[in-house]
Amino acid sequence: MSQKKSKYKYDGPIYKFDKFLCNWQGETWAVSDSKALSNLAYRFKTQNNMMPNAGIKLDPDYLSESSAVNELEHYELF
């Protein structure tokens, strides 16, 4: 059974060890808000040559959800 995925956009601050680092924008497909934040944090780390375990945090208040599709439809879009 496939899960519904939603497109999430983040446009807000990035924190490293609770200190403001920069503002950043990114988007991802995920099944939940928490998974979207995890995906986006990982993407930020890889784009900025950081180790996967770097202490990066995103503020969930700046995360927005747009459309939902089931997993099969998502793959057919690409």
Image (cartoon, rainbow, N blue to C red):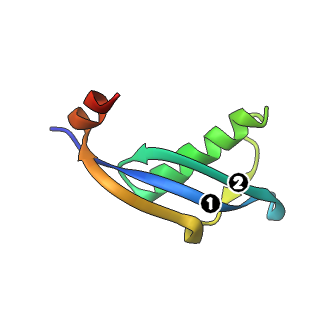
Within 10 Å of the Cα at label 1, are there few (<14), some (14-19), or many (20+) other Cα atoms?
some
At which x and y percent is residue 30? Answer: 40, 46
Residue at 57 percent of width and 72 percent of height: 61
The Cα atoms of the two marked residues, 2 and 1, are separated by 6 Å
The answer to whether residue 52 is left or right of residue 16 is left
In the picture, measured across the screen, residue 69 lies left or right of residue 78, that is left
Q: Residue at x 79, y 64 (%)?
A: 18
Residue at x 58% of width, y 47% of height: 40
Which residue is located at x 69 percent, y 57 percent? 57
Q: Nearer the viewer, residue 1 or 14?
A: 14
Q: Amino acid at mark 2?
A: Trp
* Residue corresponding to mark 1: 11
Pick the quarter of the image with the C terminus: top left
Q: Position of residue 26 (x, y in %)?
A: 59, 48
Residue wearing tag 2? 24
> Can residue 52 be seen in the rendering of this structure?
no
Tell me the quarter of the image containing the N terminus. Answer: top left
